[in-house]
Amino acid sequence: MSGPVFSNSYAALPERFYVRTSPTPVREPRLIHVNEDLARELGLDLQWISGREGAELFAGNKVPESAQPIALAYAGHQFGQFVPQLGDGRAVLLGELFDSSGRRRDVQLKGSGPTYFSRGGDGRAAIGPVLREYIVSEAMAALGIPTTRTLAAATTGEPVYRETRLPGAVVTRVAASHIRIGTFQFFAARGDTEAVRALADHAIARHYPHLSDDGRPYLGLFSAVVSAQADLVAKWMLVGFIHGVMNTDNMTISGETIDYGPCAFMDVFDPGTVFSSIDHFGRYAYANQPYIAQWNLARLAETLLPLIADDKNAAIADAEAVLDQFPTRFENAFRTGMRRKLGLEADRQGDIALARNLLDVMARNKADFTLTFRALGNDLEAAAGEGMTRSLFAVPEEFDAWAREWRARLAGEPMEPAARKAAMQAVNPKYIPRNHRVEAVVEAAAEHSDFAPFEELLSVVTKPFEEQPGMERYAEAPAPDERVLQTFCGT
């Protein structure tokens, strides 16, 4: 049996990119859960990581000799206000592993103690944010949405103090990388063009190697990130996901979802839905996410201007031309995804209007987002004015009017109902990590050290499209008194 052997390409960058930092040992490390499927992808010894050695590793008590633990530097716009230095205040990058496809993956401990960038914080994580990140990130992966993953969670045997005394924990995060828009901003704000260039070269080599031979690799990098983020946000919107803190330090160059703080999935469809307790003005509401993504990408463009062209005006024009492609890229991705959700094969004029009309009817009638799309597939063979879907609407006749248009559109395509239903159920999840279920898991773990609800919910949401007999309650919308309307950052 043996532990992981890390490589350390980010630690090979100049030392102003990070601060060498070791995790702070904890009193009593115990594993909550190990993600065996992900561990296999990373070529890890399951017996080793599931035992005492794994607990010591995932809690930060023992660092493998091959690791070079570092806390990364970055800046960022937080709710529109620029903060020139943020950095990993409670996370340590151990190094990188190669997965079964030969891709380099970061392995980071989050909640592993204070770093140079902690800004007076304790650098620790409470059990709630750790379990939330585990459940939601793995649910996102199962939904086919680019995301960081969770390799393990461990308790520390030590309390952390937020509003109350809470059990401490550490989550092990796996990412394509932890390079953020804010990483570029950190160096651009200091006028360190050499560092911006080194970071861009590293990002290209790691994520977009085809650009290495491009005549204009830095403009190509910006274009690739614009495309990746447009596709990502469209996928969020198609499952009713709200990130909650779309600051520039929470957007990756790779196009992965990162930093599951005050995130949540909508129950009732409302474009203005906000869950984050600190988003008082709805900056990061569900419907605002594509606009904020484009705004954040404009901040990335600003950092790359000196690399795009020697003439600033020419560089701005080139960057703006690329950035202007974001809305079209997003709309195309959203339209394609929504067409699949509605069971439409061909892409025809009027399809996006049909989809948006449904969303309007859902909003007016307070229909559940996930249940509505799942029920549509089940009701394909129901007679007009019948079926489950209409019962989700306060005024069913409004749904009936929309459904007549939808059925007329379906009639123009030859797909058999059974095949269409299968296609719809393959993209419309039955199970998502509903907020009230996640909160129940957190409560059981924090107050009773009971992780059985966590294990069960994790098992259910990582098979989101499957019928799971006996687990139907996890598909149900919350009762009015069960609704959880606010989520919180882990700090």
Image: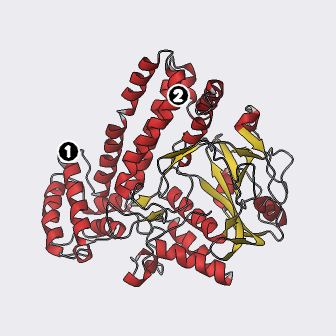
User: What colour scheme has been applied to the protein in the rendered image?
Assistant: secondary structure
In this view, 155 is above or below 314: below
N-terminal of the pair, mark 2 or mark 1, is: 2
Q: Which mark is residue 304?
A: 2
In this view, 316 is above or below 179: above
Q: Which mark is residue 348?
A: 1
Give amino acid for label 1: Arg
Answer whether residue 380 is visible to the viewer in this image: no
Answer whether residue 360 is visible to the viewer in this image: yes
**In the drawing, does residue 265 fall left or right of residue 102?**
left
Mark 2 → mark 1, Cα distance in angstroms? 38 Å
Assign the C terminus to one quadrant of the image: bottom right
Q: Position of residue 402 (x, y in %)?
A: 16, 63
**In the drawing, does residue 252 fall left or right of residue 273?**
right
Q: Tell me the residue at 74%/59% (across/down).
A: 112
Assign the N terminus to one quadrant of the image: bottom right
Label 2 or label 1, whichever lies nearer to me, is: 2
Q: In terms of secondary structure, where does tag 1 sit?
A: loop
Give amino acid for label 2: Leu
In which image quadrant can residue 75 be found? Answer: top right
In which image quadrant can residue 480 be found? Answer: bottom left
